[in-house]
Image: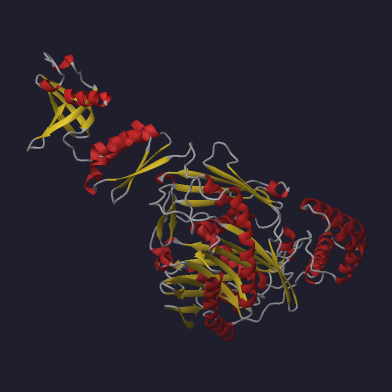
Amino acid sequence: MMKINFGKEELLLDTGKLAKQANGSVTVQYGGTVVLVTACMSKNIREGLDFFPLTVEYQEKTYAAGRIPGGFFKREGRPSESEILAARLIDRPIRPLFPKGMRNDVQIMAIVLSSDGQNDPDILALIGASAALSISDIPFAGPLACCRVGRVKDQFILNPTYAELDQSELDIVVAANSKGVVMLESRAKEISEELYLQGVQFGYENLKGVLAAQVELMKQCGKPKASVNCKKCDEALKSKVEDLGTARLKEVYKLAQKETREEEVDLLVKELQEKLVPEGYVDVDVKTALLEVEKEQVRKMIIRDHLRVDGRGFKDIRPITCEVSVLPRTHGSSLFTRGQTQSLAVTTLGTGDDEQMVEALEGEKYKSFMLHYSFPPFSVGETGPVRGPGRREIGHGALAEKSLLAVMPSKEMFPYTVRVVSEILESNGSSSMASVCAASLSLMDAGVPIKDAVGGVALGLVTEGDKAVVLTDIAGLEDHLGDMDFKVAGTKTGVTAVQLDLKIDGISLDLLKECLAQSREGRLFILGKMQAALLTPRQTLSAYAPRIDVLKINTEKIGELIGPGGKTIKSIIAATGASIDIEDDGTVKVGSTDADKSADAIRMIKAITDDVEVGRIYTGRVKRIMPFGAFCEIAPRKEGLVHVSELADRFVKSVEEVVKLGDEVKVKVIGIDELGRINLSIKQAEEKKEDKNKE
């Protein structure tokens, strides 16, 4: 067992007790949170694959928090969004550290065994994945370490608790190895690039002890690494492909349209296969060899010739167009197009009934802002099955959502549930950042009072020896053949979200600083284009959006408003069609697309919750008729007597000459006696109405 001081708690790494048949198995404990992580590898390779078959599973068992799952089956089902995001958090930094060309199946499984409700287990799962791989016989260029950085009251905090994160102006997950930063996942409240970099550096410095502990664990119980048959490109085949295809590739790079380039490359692949397969080569090997040649050519153009495939400069951004109010009946919409990437964002406003309940280990919570990302196959000119959202779609949606969280209004200021959907209609590089831009415009078009517009840009990296070129607004080919995907979102004031993924084994903090500075320049340019379409949020909501009015009632009246078994509140909802949310502090939210219905609901609520006032006019319903007058209900369980002398401005022989049972009448409160009995008048209510008409 290894123990390290790691922030407020000790980090414990243990092996040899649980899951001993796995290639590598480690339990990681921090406070009262414990995660078991295993690493397994197949003995044989999968033939015909042109990718590394790595899978990562992350599971949060509810028993870890002392709870039984909700629902009918009472057991965990498919992964939740938070579990999928945690699995991606593990996958992204470890994937580049496996040998190139490895085709053995590798599976990482992280299971949360215990949760103290304070410390997030996702960090521990990533550390455990690195440790399990490092001590196993699976080839892996580790170890790496991970931490979370927060900042409260101008002080950086290592591995903040959930409560501290609620108060923090940033949340940075830093994964690093001895060579530098490997992965970043962050959200922030409009902080400067300089402060963000300080947070990364703070986290990086605190990871050295965790790296050293894993090295020591490897010395104590690490297994010799197994010899695996890595799929390598045949140099003789590559040479032939290079001779036959280089000239054609240079012509292909001159084509402006992505789909035209891809068609030409596909034709070239078929031609090469027709020539080389008869010589004894396999189709997939010919395709792989061409990809290697293409990668070298593109990278050489960038590093040595200072040319990008589409002819742009290193900092140039593709043409941008922005439109708002593109759909007639939605609450807000926008279309953001950057080059061949296009996002249609649609905003929908709802009431408190539309909030999303999230069941997590730390307890239930509710989301009033959701951003969902959709990536149909036609966006890249392909066919494919259309099912539920995949891991990539969930990850991109989460990144765009956290990019906008910092500018969303509080529930007190804007008591709506807000959902934004980004439909990717075209894709050629960084559709997640296009989603950020489109969503920001869509929110403003819907009249959501966000603090400021948010834009996003993706940067790439190409390295060769000690040379490194940073590319702004990378296209799909540059992402595929480059070394980095660095996404930064923010306002003109500062950063709101960052995501860094690498295909190399780390970058320095100096290079990270350069990337942040270049990203700011690109982001401000994009924000300028967005502001030309819509500068500030619209002052009025769409006519099709619900109106929410907020009332404050005496908390002692809440029970009376709800009524026995909810009877009273249900009757108001049924009568008006409005949605009504009642909070424990006496806040009542009334929502409806019909202003008259909202007014009716508010009037009915006030009639119940307000104290009866002498001189005020109410709408009453005749409930009982007696020889001496009529009893009218002016609110649930609030009745008053209209004496026969107050029925009309004349002599009334019989009460039923003026009113009948069930009639609705305007009545004025003319008195409340010492016993709380209410005296009403129809006559005086009509006199007041006549006076108003004269005025």
For residue 223, what is the image quadrant? Answer: bottom right
User: Which of 535/578 is in front?
Assistant: 535
- Residue 200 sits above or below residue 575 on the image: below
Where residue 562 sits in the image (x, y, percent)?
27, 41
- Residue 461 sits above or below residue 690 on the image: below
User: Which of 599/22 is in front?
Assistant: 599
- Residue 370 sits above or below residue 46 on the image: above
Say left or right for 233 vs 491. right
Q: Residue at x 57, y 36 (%)?
A: 328
Where residue 20 sits in the image (x, y, percent)?
55, 74
Give the quarter of the figure containing the C terminus.
top left
Extreme-left residue of the structure: 674
Is residue 389 at all visible to an observer of this figure?
no
Q: How many numbered marks have been drawn onto this rendered protein structure?
A: 0
For residue 279, what is the image quadrant? Answer: bottom right
Say left or right for 115 vs 313. left
Colouring used for the render: secondary structure
Where residue 196 sits in the image (x, y, percent)?
54, 71
Q: Residue at x 12, y 14 (%)?
A: 654
Q: Residue at x 18, y 29 (%)?
A: 668
Is residue 220 at all visible to an observer of this figure?
yes
Say left or right for 483 vs 197. right
Where residue 107 sits in the image (x, y, percent)?
61, 66
User: Which of 67/611 is in front?
Assistant: 611
